[in-house]
Amino acid sequence: DTGVSQNPRHKITKRGQNVTFRCDPISEHNRLYWYRQTLGQGPEFLTYFQNEAQLEKSRLLSDRFSAERPKGSFSTLEIQRTEQGDSAMYLCASSYRGTYEKLFFGSGTQLSVL
Amino acid sequence: GENVEQHPSTLSVQEGDSAVIKCTYSDSASNYFPWYKQELGKRPQLIIDIRSNVGEKKDQRIAVTLNKTAKHFSLHITETQPEDSAVYFCAEGKGGAQKLVFGQGTRLTINP
């Protein structure tokens, strides 16, 4: 499968713990996005990178959230001191910046905070 | 602010009939309108998109129409099949894919 890859698929953690998710985009894509999706809702934008630069962050992204894309390839999303409200599907997506840019999603990481 | 209203929230049609889902947006600067299909437990998949320089786009049984003046766009699925059952999301963006704003989703059920 040469699509967007996310690990792990599922993560169960206790409130207050830190978690980290990984995303591997489609290889030729230079943009990488993180979205969050809760049950019955559409995805909500969190942040995006162009190559290694983080260009925009949503106000939804509290100080407990940090994302990196150190070499412009894979990305990590870390949530510190998790709260029950962080429980959601975290979706990664990638695209190639160009005239007809299209966004392709990974299968997501389902986070459950107990 | 940015907002996309999607209707209906649920839609049930007989196999072979047509289904229409509508979205309304508020930002006149929006120029990119994709539609995603999400099956239970799976990733959202891009099924069709349209940019503001065209009014209609068709791909086999799927079509999207855009009315820039009224700020609404619609997904049309003809000759529906059971595998069309899924949740469909509309979205809007400016200047390309980037920061998409999604609608609330429509759960489409095709009855055999």
Image (spheres, coloured by chain):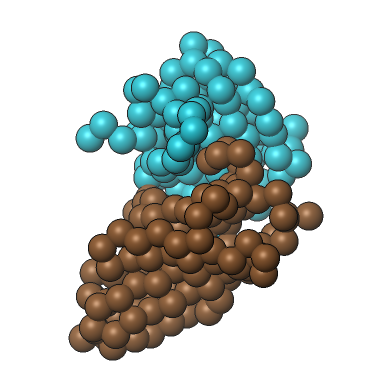
Which residue is at a point 41% across and 41% down the rendered structure image? A104
Side of A72 where B44 appears, left or right = left
Which residue is at a point 70% across and 49% down the rendered structure image? B29
Q: Quadrant of residue A23?
A: top left
Could you say which is closer to the camera, residue A96 or residue B87?
A: A96
Q: How many marks?
A: 0
Q: Percent position (x, y) of residue B57?
A: 40, 59
Side of B100 where A6 appears, left or right = left
Which residue is at a point 63% across and 44% down the rendered structure image? B94
Which residue is at a point 61% across and 18% down the rendered structure image? A53
- Chain drawn brown in the picture: B
Q: Quadrant of the C terminus of chain B?
A: bottom left
Q: Quadrant of the N terminus of chain B?
A: bottom right
Residue B97 seen in the current view: yes
Q: Quadrant of residue B67?
A: bottom right
Side of B95 where A30 appears, left or right = left
Q: Is residue B74 above or below residue A87?
A: below
Q: Percent position (x, y) of residue B26?
A: 72, 61
Q: Percent position (x, y) of residue A32?
A: 50, 30
Q: Is residue A27 above or below residue B14?
A: above
Could you say which is closer to the camera, residue B18 or residue B69?
A: B69
Colour of chain A, in one word, is cyan
Residue A22 seen in the current view: no
Q: Quadrant of residue A80?
A: top right
Q: Residue furthest top?
A: A71
